[in-house]
Amino acid sequence: MLFVAVRGEGRDGHHFIPEALERGASACLADETMRRELAPSPAMIFTPNTRAIAGLLASRAFQNPSREVALLGVTGTNGKTTTSFLIHHIFNQFSGCGLIGTVYHQVGRERLPSGNTTPGPMELHRMLFEMKQAGQKYCSLEVSSHALAQDRVAGIGFRSAVFTNLTQDHLDYHRTFENYFEAKKKLFTQEPRPLRALVNIDDAYGKRLHGLLDPKPLTFGLEEGADFRALEVEARLDRVSFLVRGRGFEIPVRADLACLHNVYNILGAFACAVAEGWDPEAVARSLESFPGVPGRMEKVPHGRDFLVFVDYAHTPDAFENVLGSVKRLSRGKILTVFGCGGDRDAAKRPLMGGLAERFSDRVILTSDNPRGEDPAKILDDIEAGIPAGRNGKVSRVPDREEAIARAVAEAGSGDVVLILGKGHEDYHILGPRKIHFDDRECARKILAGGR
C-alpha cells in the first residue's frame, strides 16, 4: 500500500506519514520540500507535486481508463452543468456516454450522488474504469477550477474541452481573478493537451483564451465570425430556438430550456458533438428530446396562473443572465428569493443584491448555507449593494421556507417567482449542521397548500 501525502486547505497529509507507516503502508509519497523534515527511510519517495502524481497513479491503478473512455470536459463559471448534461444527452443518442458533475454521476445504469463537481483522482478513475466496463465510450465531465488547481485531472487526455465563460466566483479560494483564469486555462494547456478545444468567443475571457491557444480552438457564439454561430434567436420562458450556422450548414435548433443564456450552452454542446463527427441535423433532432437539468431554471408545476422556477444561479453573471432574461420575457412582476453562502466569496454579495433589486419587482433576502457565518451579516453584505431609498421592495426573511411562502403568497396572475441559489441541492448547512432542504420540494408543498 502506498500513502500519498497531500496538502489540503485545512490539514497537511504529511503530518500523517508516521501513522501511515505504523499502520502498514509499504511506502509514502511526499513533497520534495519535506525531504529535510522527514526521517530518511527506504519507504519515503519524494516528488515535486504529490497531487499530480496521485492522478497518474490512480490512472495506472485502474488500467488507464481515459485511453478507452473519451473525455469531454466542460469548464467555466456558469453553464458547466447544463452544457455537460446536453453533451451527455446528445452523445447517448449515438454512443454510450457517462456523466460526472455537480448534480450526480451516471456510471453505466447506476446514478451516484455527487460530492464534488470533479471527484478526486481515485474516485474519478474508478468511475471511468466502471464506465469502460459498462461499454460507455464517452464521458461528459464538469471540470471545476478547484479540480484544475488541485491537479485532480492531471495526466488525463481529453478528447474535447469546452470553455463556457469566466465571471466572478470562487475568489475566496483563488484570491485573484487572474489566478482563477489561470486555473481554468490549465484544462487547455496542460499535457497531454485536448485533441480539440471549443471556446465561447463572445466571452471576454474566451477571446483571451482563444488568443493564447495554438492551434486555434473552434469557436461558438452569437457574434459574427464564430465557427458555430446562432442566428434568429428566439428565447422564451419555456424554450429557445435559433438557426445554427456552421461550416457548410445552416439548420434550425430547438430545446425546452428557458432564457437566452442557454443558447450558449446549447451551442457549446452542439459544437462538441459536430466536431466529434456526428451529423449536424441528427444532433439538432436529439436536442428536441432533452429533458432539462435538475435545478436549472426548473419549473415547479402547479395549477395557479403564475410561474415558479428554481435555479442554481449564485454568481453576479448568472443573476444578470437569469433575471435579465426573465425581465425581458415576463409580462408580470418578478419576485426573487435568494441568499448567499457563508464562508464563500463575500465580494459578490453586494453585486448580487444590486442586480436582484434592479431586475425584480420584489426581493426577499433569506439564508443559503450560511455555514459558520452569522446569517444576519451575510444579509447585511447583500443589502450593501442595494441603492439607498429602494429598500421598500426588499425584505429580509432569514427562514428560507418562510421566504418562499412569502413570495408565493404575493404572486399574482402572470407573475414569475424565482427561487435562486440552491438549485438541485437538497440540503441546508447551518453552522456545523447539515439538514435536509430542497427548494423544489418546499415550493411544491407550499403551492399545494401543505404549509
Image (cartoon, rainbow, N blue to C red):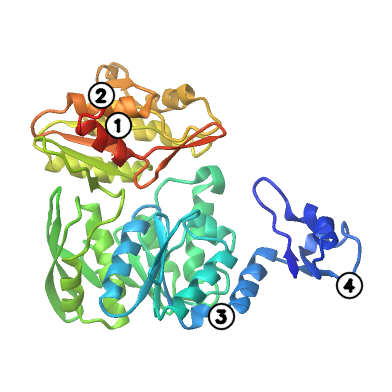
Q: Residues within 10 Å of mark 2 (few under 14, many from 20)?
A: some
State the separation of the CA atoms marked 1 and 4: 59 Å
Residue 166 in the image, given as x and y percentages of width and height: 40, 54
First reached walking from the N terminus: tag 2 or tag 3 = 3
Furthest toward the front, the residue is 450
Q: Which residue is mark 3?
A: 64
Residue located 31% across and 58% down the image: 82
Residue 337 badge: 1
Closer to the camera in the image, 18 or 217:
18
Q: Which quadrant of the rendered structure holds the C terminus?
A: top left
Front disc: 2 or 4 = 2
Q: In the rendered structure, which amino acid carries the disc numbered 3?
A: Asn
Q: Which residue is mark 2?
A: 406
Q: Earlier in the sequence, mark 1 or mark 2?
A: 1
Query: Does dot 1 land on a helix, a strand or a loop?
Result: strand
Residue 13 versus residue 418 in the image, above or below: below
- For image coordinates 20% across by 33% down, the residue present is 447
Residue 401 vs residue 214, the one in the foreground: 401
Image height of 172 relative to 234, above or below: above
Judge whether 82 appears above or below 375 on screen. below
Q: Is residue 450 visible?
A: yes
Marks 4 and 2: in contact by CB < 8 Å? no
- The quarter of the picture where the N terminus appears is bottom right
On the image, numbered disc 4 is attached to which residue? 42
Query: Marks 2 and 3, Cα distance to the nearest angstrom?
Result: 53 Å
Determine whether label 3 and label 4 are within 8 Å by CB.
Answer: no
Q: Amino acid at mark 4?
A: Pro
Q: Residue furthest right?
A: 40
